[in-house]
Image: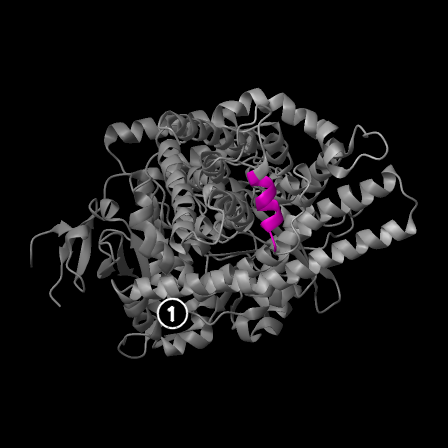
Amino acid sequence: MTPPAKPPGAPRSPVYAIVGNPNCGKSTLFNALTGLKQRVGNYPGVTVEKKTGTLYSQHGQPITVIDLPGSYSLAARSPDEAVTRDVLLGRRTDTPQPDRVLCIVDTTNLERNLYLVHQVLDLGRPVILILNMMDLVAQAGLSIRAARLEQMLGIPVIPCEAANGKGIIELKLAMSRHDLPLPRHAWDIPAAIASAVAELQASLVANGGKAPLIARAEALLLLTDQDSVRVAGSTPLDRRTEEILRSWQKRWEAEGMDWAGTLVSSRYEVIGRLAAEVVQTARVQTPTPSDRIDAIVTHPVWGWLALGAVMTLLFVSIFQFAQAPMDWIANGNAALANWIKRQMPEGDLRNLLTDGVIGGVGTIVMFLPQILILFFFIGLLESTGYMARAAFIMDRLMSRVGLNGKSFIPLLSSYACAIPGIMATRTIEDPKDRLVTILVAPLMSCSARLPVYLMMIAALLPGSSVSLAAKVGIMVLMYALGTLGAFGFAWLFKRTLLRGKPPLMIMELPPYRLPRLRDVFLHMVERAGLFLKNAGTIILAISVVLWFLAAYPKAPAGANATQQLAQSFAGRAGHAIEPLIKPIGFDWQIGIGLISSFAAREVFVSTMGVVFNAEAEGENTAPLTHALNAARWPDGRVLFTPLVCFTLMIFYVFAMQCMSTIAVVRRETNSWRWPIFQTAYMTGAAWIISFIVYQSGTALGF
Amino acid sequence: MAAAVKLSDLPIGASAIVRELPKSGLLRLREMGLLAGTRVTLVRCAPFGDPIEIKVRGYHLTLRKSEAALVIVDPQEP
């Protein structure tokens, strides 16, 4: 991710960082500048996307561009903003400090956007200011004197429409300049804090080894960076500077001085003077199209209908469009396995390939259609601006359990599949809220539980005489249980484990914009790539282990699949856990199913088919249902009593039985701690609730 | 001029000038441009009454009533 090292002395190709507020067109600009010459990864230790790309100057020299996460301020409030701050201040060892900065602003909203620019100008690096969305400026009834702004700031100011490719050539020309000027940027630090800034700056130079201008910028930042976010990979502040900061803060507190507020106000004073010179209101502001759309989509009645329609569309597309590719993948896998079977002599290696590896890869790839579709939608919702409205509408409900509106879409997505749902939590800034959302997302009943529910409902209510209403009722009950569980545990975690200040819900409602399909597609492909690269390897490894457990030790020749599974390690494990699951009504054969469905919940159905020697043929599950109803305990009692079927469904509602989810949680939380905790609490809750249901059901005579 | 009220108590559609914010608090709100002397308009409440949407410095921002209650504003005549 770092630019290639050059021999000392040779001029290094310049590194530019793109900085800007969220929703100002930053990604569009990055895509327009670098095209497909991008690398997407992660900053080590944090789940913040690291995007770098290359473009060539007019002299043919390569220029590295880092797309930093969107930020409102360098006083970071989220891991994303912390990375932006740390890269700009040269606090990250894994990323070179940018030589030059591209500041991009939404020109229709110049004042607030200039706040971040004002902080960046302090850094003492050459800055190019990009006035994006110039086409919307006139529509908004404004006119901008770019030349005046350039004159006042002393840096190149380039009007641009990144979405239409206008201004990109001018920008590339400016980026090719060797003699980019430093900002002419003198602003008076408020007298009350000037001596503190000077002292901190001196200490940062002496003890932190910083260059004077960066040190000054950092000193200013320390004063507004009160409860700032620290992330892994960031160099901590030196001790001496920390002491100086503490002593000033103590002194100001005693004097009742609002130092941070003073600093913010004085920046906005400067910005106000700039804006007064540069922005001219050409005509009276009328309600914009955005205002008119918002009047509907945040309306007390129409708003719900709009939200319901969008969500229905999302789910229908996932189920409609994902099914066909998932079938192709399944068929492709089967064909590949058959081909290998024809090409290779029978043996363990062949079985490893056909059952272990292809099975594992199949599982991974099987998730891709859902992930792609969901991220396409999420990309659309984000780039149009609707995502913020959904959070706005849902915030009140989510706040009941201590979360905020931004958790809504990830949780809802988890009804389809927890994996993209968990990957979608990156839009939640507050790390604790994000973690809680990740922890409870798999409780939402995903589509992989559906086959298990269907099989158990069929076994529970055999025969065609049972009313559809009863079946649907049980199904709805399962979904309701999962949802209640998710909210209940979120409530619990927010009050115990991850207690924190109630998160602020200060969120911009950006104007509606037409989505840029190219950017949405790029985003979608990036996400899928990250999933394959990071979660894929873990899923593959666990698949091979699960295959091994079911295939070894070998049964004597002539044994059928049922006998083989019964005496395999998996079968023995089933026996081993029987004492644990007997109190909830399960025997060792169900135990095998529980263990094997760790690969994916729907595997439970096929495992039951092998265990009871009744392979379901395609859609026809009648033979399996029949076999299940015929299954007995050794003492002759019926195994799948209605109560056991019901308990088993409840177990599946709560238990964490999905290695792919575990792999994704591992990736998104950057440690094994949380996926292990999650598996433990979910499976523990599943056992306890199943125990209560089964034992009270038995006591009541069911 | 009407008496100062909490931003959360402002009627929908009304504009006001921020009078004061809690000392050393709501820093992010200030960084988003909501400062003493800034003009705000209450655009709407969410369907459940919370959070609220305000217009400040030409853009739309949402915050919860519990946060808005900390901001004291002077209502302006339309």
Q: Nearer the viewer, residue A669 or A167?
A: A669
Q: How is the image coloured?
A: one colour
Q: Residue at x 61, y 64 (%)?
A: A31
Q: Is residue A622 magenta?
A: yes
Assign the magenta stretch its main secondary structure. helix
Q: Residue at x 33, y 71 (%)?
A: A293
- Inspect this view and state whether residue A301 appears: yes
Q: Nearer the viewer, residue A355 or A56?
A: A355
- Inspect this view and state whether residue A268 appears: no
Residue type for callout 1: Val
Q: Residue at x 57, y 37 (%)?
A: A657
Q: Is residue B8 magenta?
A: no
In the rendered view, tell whether residue A32 sits above or below residue B69: below
In the rendered view, tell whether residue A675 sits above or below residue A516: above
Q: Quadrant of the C terminus of chain B?
A: bottom left
Q: Quadrant of the N terminus of chain B?
A: bottom left
Q: Residue at x 46, y 35 (%)?
A: A647
Q: Secondary structure at mark 1?
A: helix
Q: Tell me if A472 is positioned left or right of A618 in this view.
A: left
Which residue carries the number 1 mark?
A278
Q: In this picture, which residue range is highlighted in magenta?
A: A620-629
Q: Tell me if A528 is positioned left or right of B69 in this view.
A: right
Q: Position of residue A570 (x, y in %)?
A: 69, 30
